[in-house]
Image (cartoon, grey):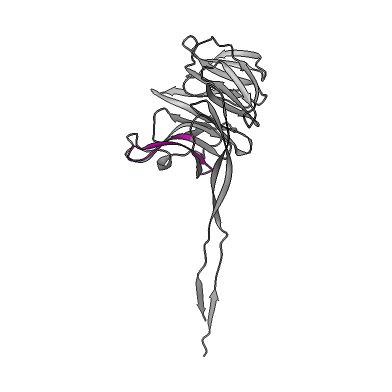
């Protein structure tokens, strides 16, 4: 009787699982005096002043294309402001003053006034316009202020509770999977652990950009914008902060406190690969 040892080496390489870390480069900056808020349309950028009295359109590199007045009362400071563009190219300007507690003006791209209506949402709780021209805002619920930070192209609403550091963002609508929460985006409001509190956001159907304050357990805080993919997974950060909008080809535009518009563009995607190998196996017979 003879025993035979058959050794089978199962050396199996599983296809690598690849994660990509996105980095961004500051491509250009330009001055837009008294800039307050921003929206993009294709490859152009619309800016509304803090006072809510002037709208200016720029190309993707900061060249002024058109500028016109909203005909708001001279010298009246806006308590709240917002700007949006619908799929037909109409521009919507929301302003609120001590005299008017929220007004939406609809303009043609050349500044011709088309319509004017009261703003039905709390004027400090966010403003957005979808492709069909529907107007969105935040809500007051149960003595809390729900702030609309971003409206995705698919209609997803990204909101948070004003002043709340835990569970920074909630999503409602078609794309609720991209909702950063838990340790990555929040913590106790006393900052006994690290905390990221969202102030502004912008979204595509596959990415979410959240600009806010990032603090550690020692209450040392810095401003940063975090970029999330599906899951959500943290893809990278942009060392900038403020009202932001997303342009074509992944460009990200920020409005600075000094009236400077900054354009960041995607740079290197660094792949990180992980492989799984099989083991040596022996059979007897």
| Rendered location of residue 179, percent (x, y) | 49, 38
Task: Please say if 250 is above or below 268.
Answer: above
The image quadrant of residue 60 is: top right
Task: Please say if 261 is above or below 231.
Answer: above
Q: Is residue 214 left or right of residue 70?
A: left
Q: Is residue 191 magenta?
A: no
Q: Is residue 66 left or right of residue 104?
A: right
| Rendered location of residue 44, percent (x, y) | 64, 29
Which sits in the foreground, 181 or 189? 189
Residue at 46% in and 11% down? 98
Task: Please say if 136 is above or below 218.
Answer: above
Q: Is residue 223 magenta?
A: yes
| Rendered location of residue 20, percent (x, y) | 55, 49
| Rendered location of residue 83, percent (x, y) | 57, 22
Dominant SS in magenta = strand
Which sits in the foreground, 190 or 60? 60
Q: Give, as a single range, the part of the protein colored magenta.
A: 211-230
**How many numbered circles does the render carry?**
0
Which sits in the foreground, 204 or 43? 43
Which sits in the foreground, 72 or 260? 260
Q: Is residue 197 left or right of residue 175?
A: left
């Amino acid at each position: 009787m003879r025993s035979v040892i058959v050794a089978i080496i199962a050396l199996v390489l599983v296809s690598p699982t690849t994660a990509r870390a996105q980095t961004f480069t500051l491509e250009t900056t330009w001055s837009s005096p008294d800039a307050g808020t921003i929206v993009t349309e294709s490859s152009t950028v619309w800016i509304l002043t803090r006072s809510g009295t002037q709208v200016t359109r720029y190309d993707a590199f900061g060249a002024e294309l058109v500028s016109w007045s909203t005909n708001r009362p001279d010298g009246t400071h806006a308590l709240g402001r917002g700007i949006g563009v619908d799929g037909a190219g109409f521009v919507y300007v929301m302003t609120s003053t001590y005299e008017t507690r929220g007004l939406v003006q609809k303009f043609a791209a050349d500044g011709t006034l088309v319509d004017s209506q009261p703003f039905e949402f709390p004027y400090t709780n966010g403003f957005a316009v979808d492709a069909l021209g529907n107007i969105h805002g935040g809500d007051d619920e149960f003595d809390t202020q729900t702030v609309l930070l971003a409206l995705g192209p698919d209609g997803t609403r990204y909101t948070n509770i004003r002043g709340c550091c835990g569970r920074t963002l909630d999503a409602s609508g078609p794309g609720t999977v991209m909702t950063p929460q838990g340790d990555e985006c929040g913590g106790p409001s006393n900052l006994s652990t690290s905390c990221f509190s969202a102030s502004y956001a912008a979204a595509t159907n596959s990415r979410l950009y959240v600009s806010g304050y990032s603090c550690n357990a020692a209450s040392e805080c810095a401003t940063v914008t975090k970029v999330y993919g599906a899951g959500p997974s943290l893809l990278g950060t942009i060392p900038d902060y403020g009202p932001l909008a997303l342009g074509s080809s992944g460009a990200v535009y920020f409005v600075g406190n000094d009236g400077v518009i900054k354009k960041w563009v995607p740079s290197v995607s660094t792949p990180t690969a992980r492989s799984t190998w099989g083991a040596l196996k022996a059979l007897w017979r």
